[in-house]
Image: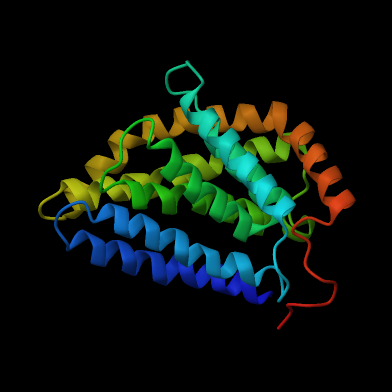
Amino acid sequence: MKKSHIATLIVFLAVIPLTLALGSRLSGRTYYVSSTLVIAELLIPFFLAFEGRRPQARELAVLAVLCALAVAGRVAIPIPGFKAIFAIIMIAGIAFGPEAGFLVGAISALASNFFYSQGPYTPWQMMAYGAGGMLAGFLFDKNRLPRKPAVMGVFGFLAVAFFVGPLLDTCSVFLVLSKISLKGALAFYISGFSVNVTQAIATGIVLLLLGRPLLEKLERIQTKYGILEAEEGSGQI
C-alpha cells in the first residue's frame, strides 16, 4: 500500500477525530480553527501522493475546478434535497485517488458553507464529505470496482446512505445531545435515514448519468498532462 494511502487512513481514523474532539471542548468560533486544521492535515497525504515531486499548477487547477463544480452541485441546483456535490467529490476520488477525493470533499464542504452558514458542524461536514471521496478512491483504485455507470451509481447510493450520511448524523449526536445515550443517538440515525436516502438517490443518479462522461474527460487530461500520477514503481511499502 502506498505511503500516501496509509497516511490518508491515519488522518481519517485518528488525526481528524482528535481535532474534532479538541475543537468541541473550546468555546467561541473555534470551528474556523478546526476547519483550517482539517485542511492542513489533509494536505499531508495529498502531498505524499506526489512521491517527492512538487505538484504542478495545472494539477492544482484541475482540483480547484472539481471543488467549484462540487460547490455548484450543492448550491446552484434548485431541486430540494437533490444535491450533486457528493457525486462530484466521488468522481474526484475515482479519477485521482483517495487523497484527492478527500481533499476535494473537505474543501467543497467548507466553501459551500459560505453560501449557507459556517458553524461547529463545518469540520464534521468536511470530514464526512471528504470521506466519501476517499472511499471512492480506495474502492475504484486498481480496478477493484469497474468504472461502469451502473457500478458507480450503486456505489454512490450505498456510500451516501450508509457511510457519509451516518457520519453527518454522528455530528448531530455530538453537537446536539447534552448527554450522549444509545437511545438518543438511535433517534438521530433513524430520523436522518430518509434524508440520507434522498441524497443517496441523487448521488446515484448523477453518477449513473454523468459519471462516465466526466471521468472520460478527466482521464484524457490525466493522460495528456500526467496529472496526479505517481511515479511508476514508487510509493509502495
Q: Is residue 30 above or below residue 117?
A: below
Residue 117: image quadrant is: top left
Q: Is residue 46 above or below residue 128?
A: below
Q: Nearer the viewer, residue 204 or 100?
A: 100
- Left or right: residue 202 compared with residue 168: right
Q: Residue furthest left?
A: 178
Q: Residue furthest bottom?
A: 237
Report if residue 155 is visible in the image.
Answer: no
Q: Residue furthest top?
A: 78
Report if residue 49 is visible in the image.
Answer: yes
Q: Is residue 121 above or below residue 43?
A: above
Q: Residue at x 38, y 63 (%)?
A: 37
Looking at the picture, how far across and down is residue 181, in whole percent? 16, 55
Q: Nearer the viewer, residue 222 or 20?
A: 222
Q: Residue at x 45, y 41 (%)?
A: 111
Q: Residue furthest front?
A: 57
Instruction: Specify the color scheme.
Output: rainbow
- Left or right: residue 206 compared with residue 24: right
Where does the C terminus fall, quadrant-wise?
bottom right
Where does the N terminus fall, quadrant-wise?
bottom right
Q: Residue at x 38, y 30 (%)?
A: 115
Q: Residue at x 57, y 32 (%)?
A: 203
Question: How many numbered dots are placed on residues in this image?
Answer: 0
- Left or right: residue 219 compared with residue 41: right
- Left or right: residue 135 compared with residue 170: right
Q: Is residue 102 above or below residue 150?
A: below
Looking at the picture, how far across and down is residue 116, in whole percent? 34, 31
Looking at the picture, how far across and down is residue 67, in whole percent? 57, 41
